[in-house]
Image (spheres, grey):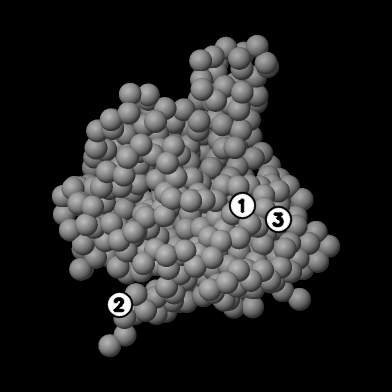
Amino acid sequence: MLPRFFLFSLLLAVATRTQAETVWPQFRGADGLGHSADVGLPLEWSEEQNIVWKTAIPGRGWSSPVLANDRIWLTTATVDYVGEAERAAKVLGSPVADAMEVASKAKLWAVEIDQQSGEVLRNVQLFEVESPQPVHSLNSFASPTPVLAAGKLYCHFGAFGTACLDTTTGSVLWRRMLAINHSVGPGSSPVLVDGRLILTCDGIDAQYIEALSAESGETLWRTNRPPIRADEVEFHKSFSTPLLIKVSGEQQLVIPGAQWFVAYDPQTGDEIWRMDFGRGFSNASRPVFDGERVFLCTGFMQPQLWAVRPDAHGELAESHVAWKQTKQIPSMSSPIVVGERIYVVGDNGVVSCFDTVSGKEVWRDRMGGKYSASPLYADGRLYFCNHEGRTTVIAPGDQYQELARNDLEGQLMASPAVVEGDLLLRTATHLYRIGAE
């Protein structure tokens, strides 16, 4: 009998292959795990080599592109920043005051781009926000990745608004505003499950998960997070994107937050299980799953990688932790699983490979740079994008094997997407379609 993890990987690859050539519908692709079944992806590129097209994007945002039906969509923000005196007053007392960006107005947009030519077809203004909450300079006013499904685009900007757009007409079907103080700006991307748009709202003032009707935007359920021990409210925030998994036929939405890993029933919002991991917060990594273990990062304060068996209900005991790793674990970038190996890149550019079953370190090396984007696995390669505009391509395996280093102008903070065997990379100013020779 084939091992369960192998069967899961095989089924996942087959399911993904039916969509990957034409659809990248959400953050980290159709499976939410950063995998694409496309082949023929580029290995080497530069500003002068293998660029199919390069399109300037107005404003700034770190959301990843999503695509279907020969159209690419992403979100962006055009911002009027305030002067130094007003900025200082707005962030007075903030523990990260020097790194905060303050705006008098932010306009939030959905941008439609032709997949073949790179031409911007439409800019749709979704919100105009007066005196929005400040965001951290590493963040943006448009960081969550939208969801694309059945001719509709669901755009989430955290406290700045959530909207549903008809992709055929460009008309806005509904808008919602949710009360939350992110402290440093929004980060969690929405997910769509059976007509429910799931939003993670982990602020410094409140922590809850809310499901909106995809059809109307009305609240279907809202579930508060478990209580957090930390006295400092800054330690209550989190920014992770949910992952939908299935365990023994049961759907689970796994959503890390400050102090707790939690799984919910996506239909009702009922809590299935929770696990206390300690003092971590500001989790930005999305979980990954290999069919037996869900892999979760604990965020700042104590960045660790945990492998948890999600096969029970209630508060999970330590016996459900298969293993932990505590060195060079990312607080922002998500892990990626390939076969029986899991790869992570720390915020400072140290990449590690662990055995998924035992947690044993297989190797560790330094790629250099700073990392926020989550890696991609496609065509037998791993792609890692850093803040400095470099994408390092490595071969998965039991030793570090670097295949290429490719540099573009501008920061790479958004996670990559795949279209027809080409890469989509978003920098601070442009969207690139990169093809092989």
Quarter of the figure with residue 105: top right
Q: Considering the image in quadrants, where does the C terminus appear?
A: bottom right
| Identity of the residue drawn at 37% across and 24% down | 232
Q: Nearer the viewer, mark 3 or mark 1?
A: 1
Q: Considering the image in quadrants, where does the N terminus appear?
A: bottom left
> How far across and how far down the image is residue 201, in percent?
36, 37
The residue that disc 3 covers is 390
Is the C-beta separation of discs 2 and 1 under 8 Å?
A: no
Quarter of the figure with residue 102: top right
Can residue 114 be seen in this snapshot? no
Is 93 placed above or below 429 here?
above
Q: Secondary structure at mark 1?
A: loop
| Identity of the residue drawn at 64% across and 78% down | 40
- Residue 349: numbered disc: 1
- Residue 4: numbered disc: 2
Q: Amino acid at mark 2?
A: Arg
Q: Secondary structure at mark 2?
A: helix
Report whether 66 appears left or right of 178.
Answer: right
Q: Amino acid at mark 1?
A: Gly
| Identity of the residue drawn at 61% across and 64% down | 383
Report whether 379 appears left or right of 217.
Answer: right
Q: Nearer the viewer, mark 2 or mark 1?
A: 1
| Identity of the residue drawn at 55% across and 25% down | 96
Is the C-beta separation of discs 2 and 3 under 8 Å?
A: no
Q: Earlier in the sequence, mark 2 or mark 3?
A: 2
Q: Earlier in the sequence, mark 3 or mark 1?
A: 1
Q: Earlier in the sequence, mark 2 or mark 1?
A: 2
Is the C-beta separation of discs 3 and 1 under 8 Å?
A: no
- Disc 2 crowd, CA 10 A, few/some/many (<14, 14-19, 20+): few
- Disc 3 crowd, CA 10 A, few/some/many (<14, 14-19, 20+): many
Q: Residue furthest right?
A: 48
> How far across and how far down the image is residue 119, in percent?
70, 56
